[in-house]
Amino acid sequence: MEKALLIREDGTRVDGRKPDELRPFRMEVGVLENADGSAYIEMGKTKIYAAVYGPKEAHPRHIAQPHRAILQCRYHMATFSVSERKAPGMTRREHELSKVIREALESVLFLEEYPRSMIEVFVEVIQADAGTRTAGLTAASLALADAGIPMADLVAGVAVGKVAGRLVLDLSEEEDKNCEADLPVGMAPSINSIVLLQLNGRLTREEFSEAMRMAKKGIEVLYEAQKKALQKRFAAYGEVTD
Ligand code: ADP
């Protein structure tokens, strides 16, 4: 597709969104029976499950740390998650994204509270339409909360991109493929902390500031939805009536 067509004359995007508009999204907590904590997120056509196990005794024993828990994180795309069959094994990209998500989560977890333990986080992308690292992080944070693991704050993420010279929030794959720059951002809003920040491509200083402002606004919307999804989960137990 021609880049110019990605932004229409009236400034709207190819899917009709305004530049600073998120895709329709949905979050649910406690969706899997067999994990200690779990969550599901849809951001547009992107669909992701996150599952958490732990804290539990570190295994194998030799990886245990005497003064803290180990956080293991696996970001994985299902074979059927992309338009052309993806090989089932872990690619370099998946290893990288596992690390990026782990580091983002480490900045809000109190790992020193759980010596000799481990926490496992699985981010399973069921359908990919861009923004999977940030949506995966948002879901992982919910799954950790669902597992009852204390965090300094929830974290949520979204990407801002530059498409046909314009900054746009929450890229779809069509936009992602044709963008001049892509800035995935993860934040812990209440403690005012940036936990994930990557930049592909180039932005001017002014564009970068504007992109961060747009990301923050989007993340605040996601953050409110995260809190609602958790309230809904725990209201089901009668622990929260609101
Ligand atoms: P993110 O999903 O965080 O935006 P990328 O920018 O690396 O990460 O990927 C953008 C999108 O490109 C993915 O969400 C997915 O829709 C698509 N994509 C990634 N890897 C593949 C692949 N192996 N085959 C087809 N599409 C892919």
Image: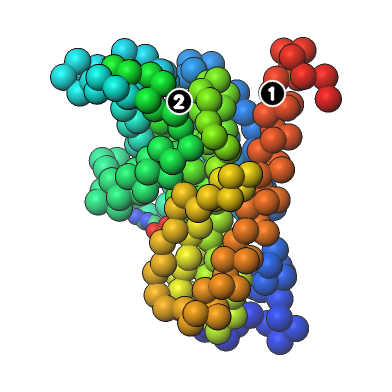
The quadrant of the picture showing ligand 1 is: bottom left
- Disc 2 residue crowd, few under 14, some 14–19, many 20+, Cα 10 Å: many
What type is the residue that disc 1 sits on? Answer: Arg
Is residue 234 left or right of 86 when viewed as pictured? right
Query: Measured along the vertical axis of the image, is residue 182 above or below residue 102?
Result: below
The foreground one among 86 and 198 is: 198
> Type of residue at label 2?
Val
Q: Is residue 187 left or right of residue 230?
A: left
Residue 52's label in the rendered image is 2
Give the residue at mark 1: 233
Instruction: Indicate the position of residue 168 as horizontal and vertical percent values.
Output: 61, 71
Q: Which residue is most to the right? A: 242
Q: Secondary structure at mark 1?
A: helix
**In the image, is residue 169 above or below residue 129?**
below
User: Which quadrant holds residue 6?
Assistant: bottom right
- Mark toward the start of the polypeptide (2 vs 1): 2
Q: Are marks 2 and 1 in contact (CB under 8 Å)?
A: no
Tell me what residue is drawn at x 48 percent, y 59 percent: 184
For numbered disc 2, what is the local secondary structure?
strand
Q: Residue furthest left?
A: 62
Instruction: Determine the residue positioned at 27% across, 43% down.
Output: 90
Where in the figure is residue 88, as x and y percent of width and height?
29, 40
Q: Position of residue 146 (x, y in %)?
A: 57, 24
